Image (cartoon, grey):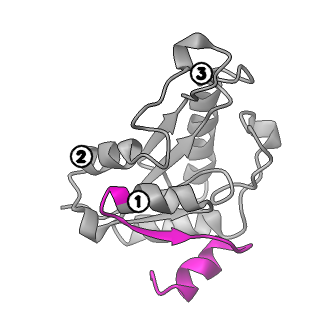
Amino acid sequence: MNRVVFFDRDGVLNVDIGYLWSKEDFVWMAGAVETIRSFNERGWRVVVVTNQSGVARGYYQESDVQALHQWMNEELTKQGAHIDSFFYCPHYPQAVKPEYAMACDCRKPQPGMILRGLAEWQADPADCILIGDKEFDVQAATAAGVKGYLFDEANLLDFVRKNGIF
C-alpha cells in the first residue's frame, strides 16, 4: 500500500491570489518545494486536490488549470521534486457556464477527489494525510477517512515539522 499526502493547492503550495491560472502570477509558498521533495524522498505519493470554480465562473478554462499543473511539475523537476497526481474540481452550483453548474462529489468539502486519489494509488486512508488551508479541506479529508491538517502559517516545511509529520 502507498502512503499519500494530499495538498490543497492555493494557500498551501502557492500564495493564494484568488483564481490563479497563470504561471506568471504563480508564487510558491515558502517551504513548499522542500516539503514536496521531502515527501518524495520518503516514498510518499504527492497528490494535489483543488477546487477550481474559476472555470465554472468563466475566468479561465480547464486547459489553463492543466497547463499550470504541468508547469508546476516542470518547475519541481528542476529542483528534484514532483507531484504524482493532480485532481481538480471545475464545478460550482452557481456557475455562469451551465455545463459546470452542479453539486458534485468532487468539490470540497465532498471527498470525491481524495477518494479518487486513494483508489489511484491503492492507499489506505489511515496511512494518508491532507494539508489544506480551509476548514472544508479538513472536512473532505475526514469524510474520506484521512487525517487532515489545517495549514495557517507562512512556511509549509516549518508547519510539517512542527506538527510531527516528519
Q: Are marks 3 and 1 in contact (CB under 8 Å)?
A: no
Callout 3 amino acid = Ser
> How busy is the neighbourhood of tag 2: few (under 14 within 10 Å), some, or many (20 plus)?
few
Question: Would you name the residue on which mark 1 appears?
Answer: 141
In the displayed structure, 109 sits above or below 158; it is above
Residue 84: in magenta span: no
Q: Secondary structure at mark 3?
A: helix
For the residues marked 2 and 3, what is the alpha-carbon distance in whole angstroms? Answer: 24 Å
Residue at the image position 50 percent from the left and 24 percent from the top: 102
| Residue 81 visible, this orientation | no
Q: Secondary structure at mark 2?
A: helix
Residue 62 location, quadrant = top right
Residue at the image position 42 percent from the left and 64 percent from the top: 40
From the image, state whether disc 1 or disc 2 is nearer to you: 1
Please tell me the numbered disc located at residue 88.
none
> How busy is the neighbourhood of tag 3: few (under 14 within 10 Å), some, or many (20 plus)?
few
Furthest toward the top, the residue is 98
Q: Secondary structure at mark 1?
A: helix
Question: Would you name the residue on which mark 3 appears?
Answer: 63
In the displayed structure, 162 sits above or below 48; it is below
Please tell me the numbered disc located at residue 119.
2
Callout 1 amino acid = Ala
Tell which of 42 and 116 is nearer to you. 116
In the displayed structure, 59 sits above or below 112; it is above
Mark sitting earlier along the chain (3/1) = 3
Mark sitting earlier along the chain (2/3) = 3
Residue 156: in magenta span: yes
Residue 121 placed where, x, y %? 26, 50
Looking at the image, residue 109 sits to the left or right of residue 20; the answer is left
Residue range (magenta) = 143-166
Residue 114 placed where, x, y %? 37, 49
Residue 149 placed where, x, y %? 50, 71
